[in-house]
Image (cartoon, grey):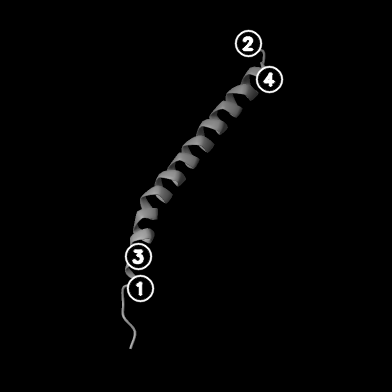
Amino acid sequence: MARQPNFNFERQERDKAKAAKKAAKLDAKKAAKASEQPETDAGSESTDATDSPRD
């Protein structure tokens, strides 16, 4: 015998899974951006015009 579908519960479960996946992806992006940012800051300091004298 087939089970009776519970559409609301199934939709809630899909939405939870989608939200968890989206949050994990956002966290990964934030972590990647945070690890990338110090490198760009250090790079901009080394190319500062005040550090190299002009003739």
The residue labelled by disc 3 is 45
Pick the front one: 8 or 32: 32
Q: Amino acid at mark 4?
A: Phe
The residue labelled by disc 2 is 1
Q: Could you tell me how far apart the alpha carbons at marks 3 and 4 are, in whole angstroms?
A: 57 Å
Q: Please identify the quadrant where the C terminus is shown.
A: bottom left
Who comes first in sequence, dot 3 or dot 2? 2
Circles 4, 1 touching at the beta carbon (< 8 Å): no
Who comes first in sequence, dot 3 or dot 4? 4
Who comes first in sequence, dot 1 or dot 2? 2
Residue at left 35%, top 65%?
A: 45
Q: Quadrant of residue 18?
A: top right
Circles 3, 2 touching at the beta carbon (< 8 Å): no
Q: Secondary structure at mark 3?
A: helix
Q: Residues within 10 Å of mark 4 (few under 14, many from 20)?
A: few
Who comes first in sequence, dot 4 or dot 1? 4
Who comes first in sequence, dot 3 or dot 1? 3
Residue at left 45%, top 44%?
A: 30
The residue labelled by disc 4 is 7
Residue at left 63%, top 18%?
A: 9
